[in-house]
Amino acid sequence: MKKALIFTTALGTILLSANANAAGFHLREQSAAAQGNAFAGATAGAEDNSYAYYNVAGLTRQKGTQLTMGGTYIAPKATAKDVYSADGKRDADVQNVVHAAVSPNITVSHQINDKWFIGLAGNSPFGMITKYDHQWVGADHGITSDVKTATFTPMTAYKATDKLSLGAGVQFQYLWAHLTSSSSKTGTGLVAEDGNSWAAGYQLGALYEINDSTRFGMGYRSEIKHKIKGKMKSSGSIYTQMGGEAGAQGEFIDSLLNQRIKVDLDTPAMFSLGAYHEINDRWAIMAEYQRVFWSSFQDLTFKSRNGNNMPGKDYIASVNEKWRDTNFFAFGTSVKLDEQWKLRLGIAYDQSAVRYQHRTPRIPDTDRYWTTIGLGYQYNEHLSFNAAYTYINARKASLDTRLTGNDGRHITAEYHNSIQAFAFGLSYKF
Protein backbone atom coordinates (compact mmCIF):
# COMPACT_ATOMS: atom_id res chain seq x y z
CA MET A 1 0.00 0.00 0.00
CA LYS A 2 2.83 2.40 0.87
CA LYS A 3 4.55 1.72 -2.47
CA ALA A 4 1.32 2.40 -4.34
CA LEU A 5 0.76 5.63 -2.45
CA ILE A 6 4.29 6.86 -3.21
CA PHE A 7 3.99 5.98 -6.89
CA THR A 8 0.53 7.50 -7.29
CA THR A 9 1.52 10.74 -5.58
CA ALA A 10 4.69 11.14 -7.64
CA LEU A 11 2.80 10.41 -10.83
CA GLY A 12 0.24 13.02 -9.81
CA THR A 13 3.04 15.58 -9.81
CA ILE A 14 3.67 14.82 -13.46
CA LEU A 15 -0.02 14.96 -14.32
CA LEU A 16 -0.49 18.32 -12.67
CA SER A 17 2.52 19.72 -14.44
CA ALA A 18 0.99 18.68 -17.73
CA ASN A 19 -1.83 21.17 -17.30
CA ALA A 20 0.55 24.04 -18.04
CA ASN A 21 0.49 23.57 -21.78
CA ALA A 22 -3.15 24.59 -21.71
CA ALA A 23 -1.89 28.07 -20.80
CA GLY A 24 -0.93 28.79 -24.43
CA PHE A 25 -3.94 30.87 -25.50
CA HIS A 26 -4.58 33.05 -28.53
CA LEU A 27 -3.19 36.59 -28.59
CA ARG A 28 -5.35 38.63 -30.96
CA GLU A 29 -3.11 41.67 -30.55
CA GLN A 30 -1.37 41.55 -33.94
CA SER A 31 -2.33 44.99 -35.33
CA ALA A 32 -2.44 48.34 -33.51
CA ALA A 33 -4.98 49.71 -35.99
CA ALA A 34 -7.33 46.72 -35.65
CA GLN A 35 -6.96 46.74 -31.87
CA GLY A 36 -8.36 50.27 -31.74
CA ASN A 37 -11.72 48.82 -32.87
CA ALA A 38 -11.47 45.76 -30.56
CA PHE A 39 -10.72 43.80 -33.78
CA ALA A 40 -14.22 44.49 -35.08
CA GLY A 41 -14.08 44.25 -38.86
CA ALA A 42 -10.52 42.89 -38.73
CA THR A 43 -11.21 40.46 -41.59
CA ALA A 44 -12.83 43.18 -43.73
CA GLY A 45 -11.07 46.42 -42.79
CA ALA A 46 -7.69 45.92 -44.52
CA GLU A 47 -6.63 49.43 -43.52
CA ASP A 48 -2.95 48.45 -43.64
CA ASN A 49 -1.13 45.20 -44.33
CA SER A 50 -1.07 44.14 -40.63
CA TYR A 51 -4.74 43.14 -41.14
CA ALA A 52 -3.44 40.24 -43.25
CA TYR A 53 -3.05 38.25 -40.02
CA TYR A 54 -6.86 38.12 -39.86
CA ASN A 55 -7.53 37.91 -43.62
CA VAL A 56 -4.72 37.45 -46.12
CA ALA A 57 -7.03 38.44 -49.03
CA GLY A 58 -6.98 42.02 -47.73
CA LEU A 59 -3.48 42.41 -49.20
CA THR A 60 -5.14 43.35 -52.51
CA ARG A 61 -6.05 46.71 -50.95
CA GLN A 62 -2.39 47.48 -50.17
CA LYS A 63 -0.88 49.17 -53.19
CA GLY A 64 2.84 49.26 -53.93
CA THR A 65 5.27 48.08 -51.27
CA GLN A 66 4.42 48.49 -47.59
CA LEU A 67 6.09 47.78 -44.25
CA THR A 68 4.09 47.68 -41.00
CA MET A 69 5.63 46.90 -37.64
CA GLY A 70 4.65 47.27 -34.01
CA GLY A 71 3.84 45.51 -30.79
CA THR A 72 1.42 45.30 -27.89
CA TYR A 73 2.44 45.45 -24.25
CA ILE A 74 -0.01 43.19 -22.42
CA ALA A 75 -0.24 43.90 -18.67
CA PRO A 76 -2.54 41.44 -16.89
CA LYS A 77 -3.57 41.65 -13.24
CA ALA A 78 -4.61 38.41 -11.59
CA THR A 79 -5.03 37.94 -7.85
CA ALA A 80 -5.93 34.70 -6.09
CA LYS A 81 -8.09 35.48 -3.05
CA ASP A 82 -9.75 33.29 -0.39
CA VAL A 83 -7.14 30.57 -0.93
CA TYR A 84 -7.82 27.50 1.23
CA SER A 85 -5.79 24.29 1.50
CA ALA A 86 -7.12 20.76 2.08
CA ASP A 87 -7.01 21.15 5.88
CA GLY A 88 -9.28 24.21 5.70
CA LYS A 89 -6.56 26.73 6.51
CA ARG A 90 -6.64 30.02 4.66
CA ASP A 91 -3.46 31.00 2.83
CA ALA A 92 -2.32 34.50 1.94
CA ASP A 93 -3.68 36.14 -1.22
CA VAL A 94 -1.42 35.62 -4.22
CA GLN A 95 -0.68 38.82 -6.16
CA ASN A 96 0.62 39.20 -9.74
CA VAL A 97 -0.14 35.63 -10.83
CA VAL A 98 -0.01 36.43 -14.55
CA HIS A 99 3.01 38.39 -15.78
CA ALA A 100 3.28 41.06 -18.46
CA ALA A 101 4.56 40.31 -21.96
CA VAL A 102 5.02 41.91 -25.38
CA SER A 103 3.38 40.57 -28.55
CA PRO A 104 5.37 41.87 -31.57
CA ASN A 105 4.28 41.89 -35.21
CA ILE A 106 5.79 42.81 -38.57
CA THR A 107 4.38 42.55 -42.10
CA VAL A 108 5.96 43.33 -45.48
CA SER A 109 3.82 43.30 -48.64
CA HIS A 110 4.40 44.01 -52.31
CA GLN A 111 2.10 44.52 -55.29
CA ILE A 112 3.38 42.51 -58.26
CA ASN A 113 0.74 43.76 -60.69
CA ASP A 114 -2.98 44.63 -60.76
CA LYS A 115 -3.91 41.04 -59.83
CA TRP A 116 -1.17 39.56 -57.65
CA PHE A 117 0.14 40.60 -54.23
CA ILE A 118 2.64 38.89 -51.92
CA GLY A 119 3.63 39.33 -48.29
CA LEU A 120 5.59 38.00 -45.34
CA ALA A 121 4.40 38.32 -41.72
CA GLY A 122 5.96 37.59 -38.34
CA ASN A 123 3.69 37.24 -35.29
CA SER A 124 3.48 35.77 -31.79
CA PRO A 125 -0.09 34.42 -31.77
CA PHE A 126 -0.05 32.23 -28.63
CA GLY A 127 1.57 32.58 -25.23
CA MET A 128 1.34 33.46 -21.55
CA ILE A 129 3.36 33.60 -18.33
CA THR A 130 2.02 32.63 -14.88
CA LYS A 131 4.29 32.56 -11.83
CA TYR A 132 3.69 31.72 -8.17
CA ASP A 133 6.01 31.67 -5.19
CA HIS A 134 7.66 28.27 -4.67
CA GLN A 135 6.17 28.06 -1.16
CA TRP A 136 2.55 28.82 -2.06
CA VAL A 137 -0.06 26.29 -0.97
CA GLY A 138 -0.84 25.23 -4.54
CA ALA A 139 2.75 24.54 -5.62
CA ASP A 140 1.80 20.94 -6.44
CA HIS A 141 -0.58 22.31 -9.08
CA GLY A 142 1.88 24.65 -10.71
CA ILE A 143 4.53 27.30 -10.05
CA THR A 144 5.72 28.60 -13.41
CA SER A 145 4.00 28.27 -16.80
CA ASP A 146 5.85 30.03 -19.61
CA VAL A 147 4.69 29.37 -23.17
CA LYS A 148 5.86 31.35 -26.21
CA THR A 149 5.28 31.06 -29.97
CA ALA A 150 6.65 32.70 -33.10
CA THR A 151 4.93 32.33 -36.48
CA PHE A 152 6.31 33.27 -39.89
CA THR A 153 3.83 33.37 -42.77
CA PRO A 154 4.68 33.85 -46.46
CA MET A 155 1.43 34.66 -48.23
CA THR A 156 -0.13 35.70 -51.51
CA ALA A 157 -3.41 37.32 -52.59
CA TYR A 158 -5.17 37.38 -55.94
CA LYS A 159 -7.80 39.87 -57.14
CA ALA A 160 -10.10 37.45 -58.96
CA THR A 161 -12.64 40.12 -59.98
CA ASP A 162 -13.23 43.79 -59.26
CA LYS A 163 -15.19 42.71 -56.20
CA LEU A 164 -13.68 39.40 -55.05
CA SER A 165 -10.16 38.82 -53.67
CA LEU A 166 -8.72 35.50 -52.50
CA GLY A 167 -5.62 34.79 -50.44
CA ALA A 168 -3.54 32.01 -48.89
CA GLY A 169 -0.46 31.61 -46.73
CA VAL A 170 1.73 28.97 -45.08
CA GLN A 171 2.32 29.25 -41.32
CA PHE A 172 5.67 28.10 -39.92
CA GLN A 173 5.31 28.09 -36.14
CA TYR A 174 7.85 27.64 -33.34
CA LEU A 175 6.58 26.78 -29.83
CA TRP A 176 8.63 26.78 -26.61
CA ALA A 177 7.41 25.85 -23.12
CA HIS A 178 8.88 25.89 -19.61
CA LEU A 179 6.74 24.45 -16.80
CA THR A 180 7.51 23.87 -13.12
CA SER A 181 5.73 22.45 -10.08
CA SER A 182 6.72 20.73 -6.84
CA SER A 183 5.56 17.93 -4.58
CA SER A 184 5.72 18.21 -0.82
CA LYS A 185 4.38 14.66 -0.40
CA THR A 186 6.98 12.79 -2.43
CA GLY A 187 10.02 14.91 -1.67
CA THR A 188 10.82 15.17 -5.39
CA GLY A 189 11.39 18.91 -5.05
CA LEU A 190 10.97 21.12 -8.09
CA VAL A 191 9.84 19.29 -11.24
CA ALA A 192 10.54 21.14 -14.50
CA GLU A 193 9.60 20.36 -18.08
CA ASP A 194 11.21 22.16 -21.02
CA GLY A 195 10.42 21.51 -24.67
CA ASN A 196 10.10 23.05 -28.13
CA SER A 197 8.73 22.28 -31.57
CA TRP A 198 8.52 23.50 -35.18
CA ALA A 199 5.30 22.79 -37.08
CA ALA A 200 3.39 24.14 -40.08
CA GLY A 201 -0.16 25.09 -40.99
CA TYR A 202 -1.97 27.25 -43.51
CA GLN A 203 -4.08 30.39 -43.80
CA LEU A 204 -6.95 31.18 -46.17
CA GLY A 205 -8.97 34.33 -46.78
CA ALA A 206 -11.60 35.97 -48.99
CA LEU A 207 -12.69 39.59 -49.32
CA TYR A 208 -15.83 40.72 -51.15
CA GLU A 209 -16.30 44.45 -51.85
CA ILE A 210 -19.90 45.28 -52.63
CA ASN A 211 -18.93 48.87 -53.41
CA ASP A 212 -16.36 51.45 -52.29
CA SER A 213 -18.11 51.79 -48.92
CA THR A 214 -19.03 48.23 -47.93
CA ARG A 215 -17.02 45.03 -47.78
CA PHE A 216 -17.15 41.62 -46.10
CA GLY A 217 -14.27 39.35 -45.18
CA MET A 218 -13.66 35.75 -44.18
CA GLY A 219 -10.47 34.39 -42.66
CA TYR A 220 -9.30 30.93 -41.61
CA ARG A 221 -6.11 29.90 -39.81
CA SER A 222 -5.59 26.15 -39.58
CA GLU A 223 -4.83 24.02 -36.56
CA ILE A 224 -1.08 23.45 -36.15
CA LYS A 225 -0.02 20.07 -34.75
CA HIS A 226 3.10 20.33 -32.59
CA LYS A 227 5.22 17.36 -31.55
CA ILE A 228 7.14 18.85 -28.65
CA LYS A 229 10.41 17.27 -27.58
CA GLY A 230 12.16 18.16 -24.36
CA LYS A 231 13.27 17.05 -20.90
CA MET A 232 11.67 16.43 -17.53
CA LYS A 233 13.92 16.96 -14.53
CA SER A 234 13.42 16.81 -10.76
CA SER A 235 15.63 18.60 -8.25
CA GLY A 236 14.92 15.97 -5.56
CA SER A 237 15.06 12.20 -5.28
CA ILE A 238 12.78 9.64 -3.68
CA TYR A 239 15.32 6.84 -4.11
CA THR A 240 17.97 8.45 -1.90
CA GLN A 241 15.44 8.97 0.92
CA MET A 242 14.33 5.34 1.18
CA GLY A 243 15.79 1.91 1.51
CA GLY A 244 14.82 -1.66 0.74
CA GLU A 245 11.77 -2.33 -1.42
CA ALA A 246 10.49 1.23 -1.03
CA GLY A 247 13.86 2.49 -2.24
CA ALA A 248 13.58 0.39 -5.40
CA GLN A 249 10.17 1.89 -6.03
CA GLY A 250 11.64 5.35 -5.48
CA GLU A 251 14.38 4.62 -8.02
CA PHE A 252 11.72 3.78 -10.61
CA ILE A 253 9.80 6.99 -9.88
CA ASP A 254 13.02 9.00 -10.16
CA SER A 255 13.59 7.49 -13.60
CA LEU A 256 10.15 8.69 -14.68
CA LEU A 257 10.74 12.22 -13.38
CA ASN A 258 14.18 12.58 -14.98
CA GLN A 259 14.21 11.73 -18.68
CA ARG A 260 13.65 12.92 -22.23
CA ILE A 261 9.97 13.39 -23.05
CA LYS A 262 7.64 14.16 -25.95
CA VAL A 263 4.08 15.44 -26.09
CA ASP A 264 1.62 16.32 -28.84
CA LEU A 265 0.01 19.75 -28.58
CA ASP A 266 -2.16 21.48 -31.19
CA THR A 267 -2.68 25.23 -31.45
CA PRO A 268 -6.31 25.67 -32.53
CA ALA A 269 -7.89 26.51 -35.86
CA MET A 270 -9.71 29.86 -36.10
CA PHE A 271 -12.54 30.97 -38.40
CA SER A 272 -13.55 34.65 -38.68
CA LEU A 273 -16.25 36.69 -40.42
CA GLY A 274 -16.13 40.48 -40.58
CA ALA A 275 -18.03 43.44 -42.04
CA TYR A 276 -16.96 47.04 -42.71
CA HIS A 277 -19.20 49.91 -43.84
CA GLU A 278 -18.49 53.60 -44.36
CA ILE A 279 -21.57 55.62 -43.46
CA ASN A 280 -20.14 58.78 -44.99
CA ASP A 281 -16.78 60.45 -45.56
CA ARG A 282 -16.12 60.61 -41.81
CA TRP A 283 -17.86 57.72 -40.07
CA ALA A 284 -17.45 53.95 -40.44
CA ILE A 285 -18.86 50.99 -38.51
CA MET A 286 -17.62 47.41 -38.33
CA ALA A 287 -18.38 44.03 -36.75
CA GLU A 288 -16.55 40.73 -36.24
CA TYR A 289 -17.30 37.14 -35.26
CA GLN A 290 -14.61 34.56 -34.57
CA ARG A 291 -14.79 30.89 -33.65
CA VAL A 292 -11.67 29.40 -32.04
CA PHE A 293 -11.66 25.59 -32.15
CA TRP A 294 -10.11 24.89 -28.75
CA SER A 295 -11.98 21.57 -28.60
CA SER A 296 -9.02 20.08 -30.45
CA PHE A 297 -7.31 20.21 -27.03
CA GLN A 298 -9.05 17.36 -25.22
CA ASP A 299 -6.10 15.68 -23.54
CA LEU A 300 -2.38 16.00 -23.02
CA THR A 301 -0.19 12.91 -22.95
CA PHE A 302 3.46 12.79 -21.90
CA LYS A 303 5.52 10.00 -23.43
CA SER A 304 9.08 8.88 -22.89
CA ARG A 305 11.46 9.33 -25.82
CA ASN A 306 13.43 6.24 -24.78
CA GLY A 307 10.56 3.93 -23.87
CA ASN A 308 10.65 4.50 -20.10
CA ASN A 309 6.87 4.70 -19.65
CA MET A 310 4.46 3.44 -17.00
CA PRO A 311 4.26 -0.36 -16.73
CA GLY A 312 1.91 -1.69 -19.40
CA LYS A 313 1.38 1.79 -20.91
CA ASP A 314 2.85 3.70 -23.85
CA TYR A 315 2.95 6.97 -21.89
CA ILE A 316 4.26 8.47 -18.65
CA ALA A 317 1.08 10.35 -17.85
CA SER A 318 -2.10 11.54 -19.52
CA VAL A 319 -4.49 14.34 -18.52
CA ASN A 320 -8.01 15.06 -19.74
CA GLU A 321 -8.31 18.79 -20.49
CA LYS A 322 -11.68 18.92 -22.29
CA TRP A 323 -11.43 22.48 -23.58
CA ARG A 324 -14.36 23.84 -25.58
CA ASP A 325 -14.71 25.90 -28.76
CA THR A 326 -15.11 29.60 -28.05
CA ASN A 327 -16.88 32.58 -29.60
CA PHE A 328 -15.67 36.18 -29.95
CA PHE A 329 -17.98 39.06 -30.87
CA ALA A 330 -16.84 42.63 -31.53
CA PHE A 331 -18.40 45.91 -32.67
CA GLY A 332 -16.61 49.13 -33.49
CA THR A 333 -16.71 52.54 -35.08
CA SER A 334 -14.19 54.97 -36.53
CA VAL A 335 -14.39 58.69 -37.17
CA LYS A 336 -12.01 60.90 -39.15
CA LEU A 337 -11.33 63.95 -37.00
CA ASP A 338 -9.56 65.72 -39.89
CA GLU A 339 -7.33 64.83 -42.83
CA GLN A 340 -4.66 63.34 -40.55
CA TRP A 341 -6.31 62.04 -37.37
CA LYS A 342 -8.69 59.08 -36.96
CA LEU A 343 -10.37 58.00 -33.72
CA ARG A 344 -11.29 54.34 -33.23
CA LEU A 345 -13.60 52.76 -30.63
CA GLY A 346 -14.66 49.19 -29.97
CA ILE A 347 -16.28 46.72 -27.57
CA ALA A 348 -16.08 42.91 -27.52
CA TYR A 349 -17.08 39.76 -25.67
CA ASP A 350 -14.54 36.94 -25.46
CA GLN A 351 -15.56 33.49 -24.21
CA SER A 352 -13.17 31.35 -22.14
CA ALA A 353 -12.12 27.90 -23.34
CA VAL A 354 -11.75 26.64 -19.76
CA ARG A 355 -14.76 25.23 -17.98
CA TYR A 356 -15.12 25.65 -14.21
CA GLN A 357 -14.69 21.95 -13.51
CA HIS A 358 -11.37 21.90 -15.41
CA ARG A 359 -9.88 25.21 -14.23
CA THR A 360 -6.38 24.98 -12.72
CA PRO A 361 -4.05 27.56 -11.12
CA ARG A 362 -1.95 27.56 -14.28
CA ILE A 363 -4.66 29.33 -16.31
CA PRO A 364 -7.32 30.96 -14.12
CA ASP A 365 -9.19 32.09 -17.21
CA THR A 366 -12.83 33.12 -17.58
CA ASP A 367 -15.10 35.12 -19.93
CA ARG A 368 -13.91 38.66 -20.70
CA TYR A 369 -15.37 41.99 -21.80
CA TRP A 370 -13.29 44.35 -23.94
CA THR A 371 -13.34 48.14 -24.23
CA THR A 372 -10.86 49.78 -26.60
CA ILE A 373 -9.87 53.17 -27.96
CA GLY A 374 -7.39 53.87 -30.75
CA LEU A 375 -5.88 56.80 -32.58
CA GLY A 376 -4.43 56.89 -36.09
CA TYR A 377 -2.20 59.64 -37.47
CA GLN A 378 -1.33 60.05 -41.17
CA TYR A 379 1.97 61.96 -41.05
CA ASN A 380 2.33 62.14 -44.84
CA GLU A 381 1.50 60.04 -47.90
CA HIS A 382 4.17 57.50 -46.93
CA LEU A 383 4.21 57.31 -43.13
CA SER A 384 1.38 56.67 -40.65
CA PHE A 385 1.14 55.75 -36.97
CA ASN A 386 -1.43 53.88 -34.89
CA ALA A 387 -1.86 53.52 -31.13
CA ALA A 388 -4.50 51.69 -29.09
CA TYR A 389 -5.46 51.06 -25.49
CA THR A 390 -7.57 48.10 -24.34
CA TYR A 391 -9.10 47.36 -20.96
CA ILE A 392 -10.36 43.81 -20.46
CA ASN A 393 -12.54 43.01 -17.47
CA ALA A 394 -12.82 39.31 -16.65
CA ARG A 395 -15.50 37.57 -14.65
CA LYS A 396 -14.53 36.19 -11.25
CA ALA A 397 -12.96 32.75 -11.69
CA SER A 398 -13.67 30.15 -9.01
CA LEU A 399 -11.25 27.25 -8.56
CA ASP A 400 -11.80 23.91 -6.81
CA THR A 401 -9.14 21.31 -7.61
CA ARG A 402 -11.29 18.44 -6.33
CA LEU A 403 -13.22 18.73 -9.58
CA THR A 404 -10.08 17.89 -11.56
CA GLY A 405 -9.59 14.66 -9.60
CA ASN A 406 -6.67 16.00 -7.53
CA ASP A 407 -8.26 16.10 -4.08
CA GLY A 408 -5.02 14.80 -2.54
CA ARG A 409 -3.69 18.32 -3.08
CA HIS A 410 -7.02 20.06 -2.77
CA ILE A 411 -7.17 23.87 -2.81
CA THR A 412 -9.92 26.38 -3.49
CA ALA A 413 -9.56 30.02 -4.54
CA GLU A 414 -11.25 32.97 -6.21
CA TYR A 415 -9.37 34.72 -9.02
CA HIS A 416 -9.97 38.36 -9.90
CA ASN A 417 -8.55 39.14 -13.33
CA SER A 418 -8.21 42.15 -15.61
CA ILE A 419 -5.91 43.10 -18.49
CA GLN A 420 -4.59 46.33 -19.94
CA ALA A 421 -3.00 46.32 -23.40
CA PHE A 422 -1.06 49.17 -25.00
CA ALA A 423 -0.37 48.89 -28.75
CA PHE A 424 1.75 50.94 -31.11
CA GLY A 425 2.48 50.50 -34.81
CA LEU A 426 3.81 52.33 -37.81
CA SER A 427 3.33 51.79 -41.54
CA TYR A 428 5.55 53.00 -44.35
CA LYS A 429 4.56 52.91 -48.00
CA PHE A 430 7.51 52.97 -50.38
Image (cartoon, rainbow, N blue to C red):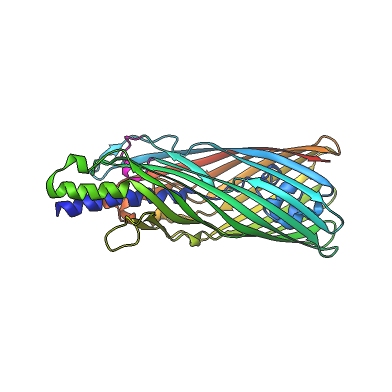
The answer to whether residue 205 shows anywhere in this view is yes
**Residue in the foreground of this view, choosing between 418 and 146:** 146
**Residue in the foreground of this view, choosing between 329 and 172:** 172
Q: Residue at x 31, y 44 (%)?
A: 140
With 226 as the anchor, is 55 left or right in this view?
right
Q: Residue at x 47, y 59 (%)?
A: 297
Quarter location, residue 55: bottom right
- Which residues lie in the magenta part? 134-143
Q: Quadrant of the N terminus?
A: bottom left
Q: Residue at x 21, y 47 (%)?
A: 250
What is the total number of numbered labels drawn onto the structure image?
A: 0
**Residue 310: horizontal and vertical position, in percent?**
29, 58
Asked if the stretch drawn in magenta spans residue 17, the answer is no
With 277 as the anchor, is 222 left or right in this view?
left
**Residue 219: horizontal and vertical position, in percent?**
67, 59
Q: Quadrant of the C terminus?
A: top right
**Residue in the foreground of this view, choosing between 55 and 212:** 55
Quarter location, residue 194: top left
